[in-house]
Image: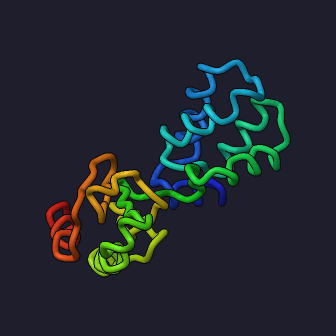
Amino acid sequence: MNASNDQATKETGKPQQDMAAAVTEVLKSFKGEKAELIPILQKVQLKLGYLPREAMRKIAGFVRMPESTVFGVATFYAQFKFVPVGRNIVKVCRGTGCYVKGAPRILEEMEKALGIEDGGTTKDMEYSLETVACFGSCALAPVVVVNDRVYGRMTPEKARALVKDRK
């Protein structure tokens, strides 16, 4: 294995060939038009869990755009990730309603329970922790979302139990 294969394996647990095959599979459903860039990035990330450098290069070639342009578009949007994320994404709302009702304490408790800081991923790749500007669920404040499930009226105790119950 070469150095880039070692890195791909280290990041995802899968060799780079698997990543390349997954990207090729996604690209088959597109024509290669520049207007398809964002949907391509979204589908590749959905398939791989993030956008590795080699995938971005392959996408750039497919849509006939400079790699720097593809990277610029991808970094503009917060939805795109460039490092592997955990299998479970824990998002803590930091919107005004949630903030006033205790979101900073909820985040602190989640950081302690998971052993990571905001923006981090556990070593076992089980959890990633993020803060989000607002979920629009202010009536349930403070809110935590794990994957796509909303947990409202959180307390530090409920936050701790939520993570403990999932481990």
Q: From this view, report whether residue 41 is shown above or below residue 160.
A: above
Examine the image and state in which quarter residue 30 appears.
Answer: top right
The location of residue 27, given as percent across then percent down, is: 63, 26
Q: In this view of the protein, can residue 3 be seen by the observer?
A: yes
Q: From this view, report whether residue 7 is shown above or below residue 38.
A: below
Seen at 37% across and 65% down, the residue is: 97
Seen at 40% across and 53% down, the residue is: 135
The location of residue 13, given as percent across then percent down, is: 45, 54
Which quarter of the rendering shows the C terminus? bottom left
Q: Is residue 140 left or right of residue 60?
A: left
Seen at 43% across and 77% down, the residue is: 117
Seen at 48% across and 54% down, the residue is: 12
Q: Nearer the viewer, residue 145 or 135?
A: 135
Examine the image and state in which quarter residue 1 appears.
Answer: bottom right
Q: Is residue 147 left or right of residue 6?
A: left
Q: Is residue 34 left or right of residue 140?
A: right
Q: Nearer the viewer, residue 130 or 62?
A: 130
Q: How many marks?
A: 0
Q: What's the coloring here?
A: rainbow
Q: In this view of the protein, can residue 125 be seen by the observer?
A: no
Q: Nearer the viewer, residue 159 or 155?
A: 155
The location of residue 165, given as percent across then percent down, is: 14, 63
Q: Is residue 144 left or right of residue 85?
A: left
The location of residue 49, given as percent across then percent down, is: 48, 47
Q: From this view, report whether residue 108 is shown above or below residue 24.
A: below
